[in-house]
Image (cartoon, rainbow, N blue to C red):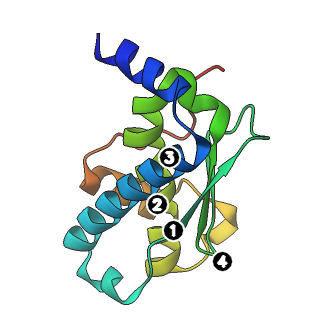
Amino acid sequence: MRVGLICCTIQHMTRTELLQQCQARAARVWAEYCRIYPQLLKYTQPEIVLNARFSKTAGNCEVEHNIINLGLKFFAKHYDRMMFEIIPHEIAHQIDYNLHGLPQGNRWHGKTWQNIMIRYGLEPKTYHDMEI
């Protein structure tokens, strides 16, 4: 029932309202990560951007610009997963960069990122299975 209510709410939500909810969720996730990794307090939480062009990518993190892009189209059917899986997943990439720099050999889902996800309490999944 909860998912149905959320989907109904998403359909009536403006893009600005959705962005505000994503930013608020990201702030809560960032605060929790800062509790786990106090050295993050010297960094700024990433900016959230909704990207209407994404159709396969649910999210990505531009670590050198401190920006997280989220696939707008995924929210209609996968609001909870976007909020509770994808946002923490992408923030974990920014944290990995902040704490360890660019990954060796372009291994964005390497051991340091996996450990960040595990310490947060999520399975370190590399890819999603969501369809739009």
Q: Which residue is the site of mark 4?
A: 64
Q: Which residue is the site of mark 1?
A: 94
Left or right, 119 with respect to 17, comes to: left
Left or right, 46 with respect to 71, comes to: left
Q: Which residue is the site of mark 3?
A: 17
Point 55% across, 31% down: residue: 75
Q: Earlier in the sequence, mark 3 or mark 1?
A: 3
Q: Nearer the viewer, residue 13 or 110?
A: 13
Q: Residue furthest bottom?
A: 42
Amino acid carrying mark 4 in the image: Glu
Q: Is residue 30 above or below residue 4?
A: below
Asked whether the residues under the numbered discs 1 and 4 touch, taking CB atoms below 8 Å apart as contact, a structural biologist would say: no
Residue 91: mark in rendering? 2
Mark 3: which secondary structure?
A: helix
Image position, residue 111 (x, y; %): 45, 58
Q: CA distance from mark 2 to mark 3?
A: 21 Å
Image position, residue 8 (x, y; %): 45, 18
Image position, residue 115 (x, y; %): 35, 58
Mark 1: which secondary structure?
A: helix
Q: Nearer the viewer, residue 118 or 28?
A: 28
Mark 2: which secondary structure?
A: helix
Amino acid carrying mark 1 in the image: Gln
- Tell me where residue 24 sits by quadrant: bottom left
Left or right, 97 with respect to 25, comes to: right
Q: Is residue 106 above or below residue 73?
A: below
Q: Earlier in the sequence, mark 1 or mark 4?
A: 4
Q: Nearer the viewer, residue 57 or 4?
A: 4
